[in-house]
Amino acid sequence: TAVIYKGNICASKSNIDFFPKSFEFTCASFKIDQDNKFAVLVIYRPGALTYQFFQEFDALLCELSSKFDKLFVTGDFNIHFENVLDKHSLDCSEIVSSYGLQQNVFQPTHNQGGIIDQVFTCGLDILSVEVESVDTLGSDHFPIFTKLKLEVCKKTIKEVTFRSLKDVDKDAFSADVTRTIESQYKATDCFEESVTILTNSCAELLSRHTLLKTAKIPTVAQAPWFDKDYQMLRAKRRKSEKKWRKSGLEDDRLLYVALRKECTVLAKDKKKIFFTNTINKCENKTKKLYELVNRTLDRNQGTPLPELSKDAPDVSKLASNFNSYYTGKVEKIREGIQSKAASNYK
């Protein structure tokens, strides 16, 4: 198995400490922007179908779902999904549906018939799934083309001004400061006025020694638990890292490692306190708790119910759509119950 992608796409192999015996797999993580990524899992299941496959497949999906909200699972399962009464097909469908994955291929994928290749998705907007039933690749399997709608969040850019202090000649700057204080600075009866004169003189000298530069940087939304204590510790850690990389000394490295671990522990504690307080504010109300979970995990769930068109509002058509929706829902539930009952008595 393999995942092939274009060079301009940000992707990386997902290192999963899992070694199944009943199938092969390759997993990759695709990053669309800072807060938008999904996993692609490619599976090939050879040989006879055993219960071990369902156990290992379930364990793999459990591992992935804990790391990714959006999943794209595809491959050659060698299970006849077109047979809705088949026990293996039902078992596999139950496993994927328990993780919120939906089946997307409903056309034969093999030149001898049968849907043995499949595409399952969770949290992704599918535009189309097409099976090209023409032997153009010299294989007995037909290629499946899937189109996804991936929205890229636009970054907010801000302009900042700064001076590169490391380019300043320290000896020359120190000599100029000394001369300025000796020749221009005069003490006054007002302390605030003396500080202002000294500050302005140093600022003028600084502008002579280094130019003011401008740069455009993306704004990053700060986490709600990110407070002043954590910010100061991070600054201390960065300073320690720079010192170690510059000196290369073992003592500096150990100090940096200790501060890095301290940062990690503090971040976990801050998150724990924040989310504990936020959950307590829900006051044991289920609706508020679910809203908090969806908001925290960025789950924008759209309603499956029919909606009234803004361009051509037709109340009678909307009522008809609602009737069809609920009628179809009842029929689907009945079909599911009947198929499961039939499989149990097989």
Image: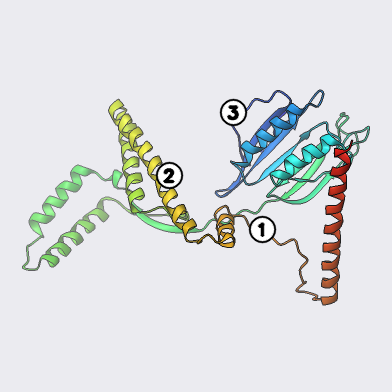
Give x and y (percent) for residue 30. 63, 41
Disc 1 marks a residue whose amino acid type is Gln
Disc 2 marks a residue whose amino acid type is Lys
Residue 216 in sight here = no
Q: Secondary structure at mark 3?
A: loop
The residue under label 3 is: 17
- Describe residue 305's horizontal placement relative to residue 142 as left or right: left
Q: Nearer the viewer, residue 230 or 324?
A: 324
Give x and y (percent) for residue 13. 61, 33
Give x and y (percent) for residue 112. 94, 32
Q: Nearer the viewer, residue 74 or 195?
A: 74
The Cα–Cα distance between marks 3 and 1, rounded to whole angstroms, is 32 Å
Please determine whether, in this image, residue 248 is positioned above or below residue 183: above
The Cα–Cα distance between marks 3 and 2, rounded to whole angstroms, is 24 Å
Mark 3 / mark 2, whichever is N-terminal: 3
- Describe residue 223's horizontal placement relative to residue 175 as left or right: right
The Cα–Cα distance between marks 2 and 1, rounded to whole angstroms, is 28 Å
**Residue farthest to the front, as pictured:** 345
| Disc 3 + disc 2, Cβ < 8 Å | no
Query: Tag 3: Cα neighbours inside 10 Å, few (<14), some, or many (≥20)?
Result: few
The residue under label 2 is: 268
